[in-house]
Amino acid sequence: MLIKSTIPLMIPFVSLIWLQESISQRVIWAGGLGFIGVFLILKPDGDTNWASFVALSSSLMAAIAFVTVRKLSATEPTLRIVSYFAIVGLSISAIPLIWTWQTPTLSQCLMLMGVGLTTTIGQLLLTRGYQSAPASSVGIFTYTSVPFGTFLGWLFWNELLDKNSYLGAVLIVLAGSIVLRTKIIHNQPDN
């Protein structure tokens, strides 16, 4: 999950190449600060495995998907973009079901419907965010998944946080605040 949190670091560069969106120095600096926060929480030990490569590849693909949403938002409404995303995602993820299908119980069906509803709402809100602001500015806020994931790990699995994890979470929140402050400053009318 933490490696996947590098998405915001990739979004500005993907949006620069594809959408020709400019990247402010503040956003680049905030991205670096957020990456340091992820690094502090991740505590890499130099042992790279295939799962790390998969997570990094997933981050790149997610960054491309987010920038694609930004590109589509110029011509498509939010609901249509989310529908496209759901259809493509379902089609791709259904392939492994051929080999691994298990019929869910009633309670599992209810949980799956709850997950589907909340992720659809989240996708609608995320798509609306990418329609409203440059991808490089919105993407930085996905860093918040790191402190939330860390908190949920503590809450449900009793994983204890160390000083580096707390410092990393603070840096991630600070990076998001810097980007938000940059957007507020740039959106104020000129005097």
Image: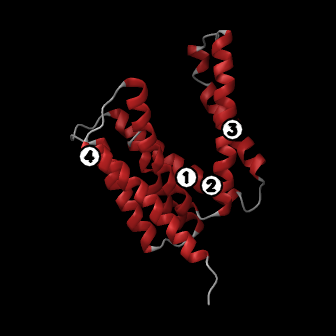
Q: Which sits in the foreground, 33 or 92?
A: 33
* Residue 92, percent from left and from top: 62, 32
Asked if residue 161 can be seen in this view, the reply is: yes
Residue at the spot 61% in from the left edge and 75% down from the top edge: 187
Amino acid type shown at disc 3: Thr
C-alpha span from label 1 to label 4:
30 Å
Q: Which mark is residue 181?
A: none
State the SS at label 3.
helix
Q: CA distance from mark 1 to mark 3?
A: 19 Å
Q: Residues within 10 Å of mark 4 (few under 14, many from 20)?
A: some
Q: Residues within 10 Å of mark 3 (few under 14, many from 20)?
A: some
User: Marks 3 and 2, Cα distance to the nearest angstrom?
Assistant: 18 Å
What amino acid type is highlighted by mark number 1? Ile
Check the image and report above or below for 131 versus 125.
below
Specify whether 80 is left or right of 104: right
Question: Residue 57's image quarter?
Answer: top left
Residue 164's label in the rendered image is 4
Can you identify the residue that label 3 sits on?
120
Q: Which residue is mark 1?
A: 64
- Of mark 1 and mark 3, the one earlier in the sequence is 1
Residue at the (66%, 34%) spot, across then down: 118
x and y percentages locating residue 148 in the rendered image: 45, 40
The residue pinned by badge 2 equals 68
Between disc 4 and disc 3, the foreground one is 4
Q: Residue at x 77, y 55 (%)?
A: 76
Side of 191 where 80 appears, left or right: right
Query: Of callouts 4 and 3, which one flags the residue occurring earlier in the amino acid sequence?
Result: 3
Q: How is the image coloured?
A: secondary structure
